[in-house]
Image (spheres, grey):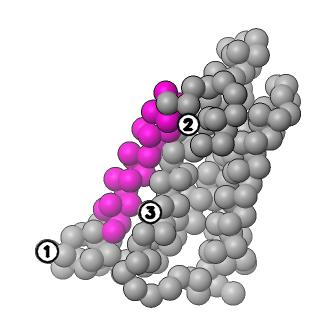
Amino acid sequence: MSARSDAAPGSWIALAPIAAIALAGVVGGASAPLFALSLEEAGVGRGWIGLNAAIGSVAILVFGAASAPLLHRFGLGPFLCLCLAVLALSLIGFKLLDGFFWACVWRFFVGAAFAGLFVGSEFWILSAAAPPERGRPEQGGGGRMGWAVAIYTGVLQASFTAGPALLLLTGSKGWPPYLT
């Protein structure tokens, strides 16, 4: 099964990858400071907190590269569902199993799930837009999917900002920031 076979025709197709990247951006933007604040509150030193952050980056690099073959093998829908499940379980796991070792494990899985959501949604939106339409609005030769690619990019940037803003609303203590 190819990854492209999961994409359905029609203009609504742009909404799903935009929603997927928004979720990935919000979680990516919120989890970095949330994990750091939680570790600091637990008495973990700054150097160790930095190492924990680096583990998430390593996961993004490793799983970002591994995402394309997995997408091709399993298809877009199952791949994105797996990434969402890993993301949700990792956030809950971070809250349930504390300690620096577990924080590193959960940070790795959050990074991997983020990379998968990012690669999958990028594939999805770019598959829906023909090469001449990508990033080009209707005037100048692009089609309506050109607008979708531009909106997708803007939503990604805004969602990274929304993550820390969400922490302002939920705080960093208790279950709310992990379940929101």
Residue 170: give x, y in percent of width and height. 55, 31
Toward the viewer: 29 or 115? Answer: 29
3 part of magenta stretch: no
Residue type, mark 1 in image: Gln
Task: Give the secondary structure at mark 2.
Answer: helix
| Residue depicted at 52% across the width and 65% down the height | 121
Q: Is residue 73 left or right of residue 97?
A: left
Q: Which mark is residue 116?
A: none
Toward the viewer: 47 or 156? Answer: 156
Residue type, mark 3 in image: Ile
Distance from the alpha carbon under mark 1 to that under mark 2: 37 Å
Q: Is residue 31 left or right of residue 125?
A: right
Image quarter of residue 28: top right
Q: Which residues are magenta?
A: 148-168
Q: Which residue is mark 3?
A: 18
Q: Earlier in the sequence, mark 3 or mark 1?
A: 3
Q: Which residue is mark 1?
A: 139
Q: Which residue is mark 2?
A: 30
Distance from the alpha carbon under mark 3 to that under mark 1: 22 Å
Q: Is residue 178 visible?
A: yes
Distance from the alpha carbon under mark 2 to that under mark 3: 18 Å
Provide the major secondary structure of the magenta segment: helix
Residue type, mark 2 in image: Ala
